[in-house]
Every structure is written in structure tokens, then in C-alpha cells.
Amino acid sequence: MKVTGLALVPPPSASDLPKVTPELLASVLARYSRSNDGLAAILEKVDLANPDASIDRILKFVDYGHASIGGLTGGLAIALDDVSMWLAYKIFEISQMADGQESSTRYITMNASNLPTAAEIGMPDDLIRRWQTLQAKAFASYNSEYARLDAAALANPELVRLPPAATPAVVTRLRKNYALDRARYFIPFATRTNLGLVQSSRMWAQTVKHLDSLPQLEARAAAKAIRDVLLKISPRLMRHSVAEKSYEEQARQELAVSFKLGLERLSIAPLADEVWVHVDRATPPFLAETQPLSEALRHRTNRYAYQGAATRRMRVTFAWNNMAVAELRDLNRHRTGHRYTPLIQAGFYLPPEIKHTDHAALLNEQADLTRELMQRGSPAYVYSLLLGAQTPFEHSTHADKFIYEAELRTGMGAHSRYAEHLSAALLEFFKQVPEAKDWVVEGTAEPE
């Protein structure tokens, strides 16, 4: 694992702007909130050549809360190279205020050389060889199915949905995507990837504290590596980023639930789709909703447009019983509200183009290892999962955010499985909010 921090400075064209460190920026703005002098007057008292002394002087002026100060540091960028897909998923889950990107699966090395070591993930010593063998077999299944599907699409172009007048380059790209998107369910969740996040010092401190409180060794190693980098950028504020009892206890309880449900429901048989949607339209009697839902939606020109109070105030919780980890990794990045999954294998999804029976031995071997790790109470069980593992997944948010997600995940370029899941959720949403149907644009997942 390699962690790199990036600090932003004003561009050359903005040479008249003061160049301040993140912590100096935060302290100046904090002082600004307790002064009527104006920002220019405060900056005149700041020694830019000696920012640490200025920070200390300002912070001693009054007892500022470190959290409120940390939120004023601006965007601190951190890149994490060579972390597992599980850790990337977990960081996106707990960093709800971050902007970030992860390396596309299309550009990740798909063989056993691209895995963390057994020591890095805390795999029990007597299961290391078994885990390594399983991972190698999973990559072999991925590569063989990818090659088969790519060859089939090359021989039968009608298998791939192509836009009109597609160029040869587009045809090739969509054919490769067709093969990868169907073979990817064999990819190990332990596969290494890269991600970059931008968030304030306040949110970084919370993220690092959370990581440091998790039972997985990789998470705690990431916490230390991120903290070491951020201490160079925001040293005072990152002091509040160590493991904390409430985080540790919640992590312990959630892991216990995962073991209980995981052992009860562990299966390689694919689960039939089941979706649950709950809409809460209640408003206080002294502030009743007066806007027709049509007025909240009909003025939009695309899914990014602003919606009215009728949808912004409506609470929506939606869940699926069988979200494959492959889809979970992306749906988990919709940051609004809260997402929850016990991250278990209650079934195993493969697309219709791939037969379960052709890979029964691998899937049984994988399920047996997952069972063994769960029975031992090992948090390393997450690294035995493949991207086809199906888990319950719940997301609670507001209707405007749900509508955006549904339109995005059924729209141009959306993976077919995303579209199936979100179409089912939309159908249930329309049953409870029928007047939305005329204004929500459900796509058909056309290729791009």
C-alpha cells in the first residue's frame, strides 16, 4: 500500500492571493467567525512566512472545537495505491462527504500477482495456501470466461448492443466491455486497486478514526499510512484520528451480525430478485407540503437539474436482497444518506451467458473457505468473497437523490444489472408515488 498526499496552492495567474496552508486557512476562517474586523484585517496580522506561530496564536484566542475547524481546511487530496477492492469499498462507505475516484476494473491486473499478501490481510496461517489457491482459480475462471465471451462477441456481433453507425474502435471497446462485465463476477474482492479522495481535515480525521477502529489489519494499516501523510499537511487536526471506543464497539457488533447472517444464509445458488422500497411523505402539521410533485420535477432538463421541495423533503429507503458485490461497489458510492450491508454471501450471481454448473467446483470451494473463516470469527472472511457474492444492501436517502440514482443507473452506459435493480426499485417507488411516473426518466441502459 502506498499513500500520497497532494496539497493545493493558488495557480500562478492568482499571484495576488495569499498562499496559506490548510490549517492556517482553517484558523483564519475560525478567527473570522469571532471577529467583526473583516478577513483582510485578520490576514494583515498573519505572518505567512511563519504560519505555525500564526496558527497557534489564533487557536489560543478562544477554545475552538477541532471538528468545526477541521471542516474549514478545504480539500485535502489523498491517493491510495494498491489497496484491496474491499478496502476501497469500505473507505467509500465511511467517507460520505468525500469526492473520489477508483481505478476502473478495466485497467486492473487480473492475476494472482495483484493481491495483497496473506500477512497484510490477516489470513490465518493454516488457511493461507488454501486462500491463495482459491484466488488463482478465481482469476483463471475470470480470464477463461472473458476470452470465451470476447471470442463469441467477435464471431457474433449481434450479441453486443451497438449504437447506430458505431466506428470500429467503438465496436471493439463495447465488445471488450461486454466480456468484462459478464466475467467480472469471478474477480476476487481482495484484488488490488487504487483510489483517490478529496475531503476536509475534519472528514479525514473521522475516516481515519473509523478505519483505525475496524478489525481488519489492512484498514488499520491504511489508517496509519493516511495519518502519517496528513500529519505533514494538517498536524494539529489529525491528532484526533485514532481508534475510539464507540467506533470499535459498533464495528464489533456489525461483524457479529455478519457472522450470524453469513453462516445462516451462505449459498452459491443465485437468489431470485427481491426489492423493498419505503416512502415516507409525512410533514409536520405546521409546515405541510404544498407543492404538487409535478412542479418539483417537470422543470428539469436532465437528471442533474434542481428538484422542488416535494421530492427534497420526501424520505426514501430502498433495499435489495441480492446485490452482487460487483454492483455494490458502485451503488455504494452514492454518498447521500446512509448505506448498510452485512456483506455476506447469501447467493452467487452469474449472468445468463455463464453457467453455474461449469464453475460449481470453484464456487463450492470458495463458499467452504468463507464458511471456515466465519466459523473462526475471522474478519479476513471479506477477502474470500468474489464479486459475484450476493448480499442484502439498504440505502436510505431522500426522493430527489433516489430519482437521480435511478435515472443514472438505468441510463446511457449503465451496466445491465444496475438497470435491473434500479428498474425494480423504481416500479415499487411508482406504486407509492404514482404521480412521479410521468416525470422520472427511466433509461434502457444503452451502451456508450
Image (cartoon, rainbow, N blue to C red):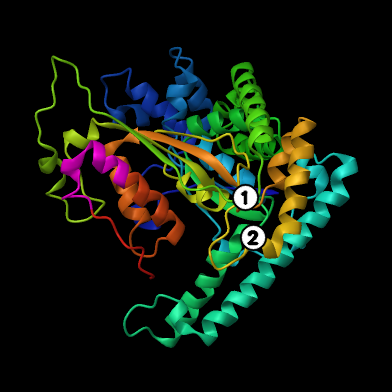
Taking the spot 14% from the left edge, 38% from the top edge, the residue there is 293
Place of residue 129 in the rendered image (x, y in percent of width and height, measured from the top left): 87, 51
Taking the spot 70% from the left edge, 30% from the top edge, the residue there is 215
Nearest to the observer: residue 200 or residue 11:
200
Q: Is residue 416 above or below residue 174?
A: above
Question: What kind of residue is marked 1?
Answer: Ala
Judge whether residue 123 can be spotted in this image: yes
Dot 2 and dot 1 residues touching (CB under 8 Å): yes
Q: Which residue is mark 2?
A: 356
The image's mark for residue 238 is: none
In the structure shown, which secondary structural element does the residue marked by tag 1 occupy?
loop
Place of residue 22 in the rendered image (x, y in percent of width and height, measured from the top left): 48, 36
Segment colored magenta: 427-440
Question: What kind of residue is marked 2?
Answer: His
Judge whether residue 11 can be spotted in this image: no
Q: Is residue 67 left or right of residue 39?
A: right
Nearest to the observer: residue 412 or residue 261:
261
The image's mark for residue 269 is: 1
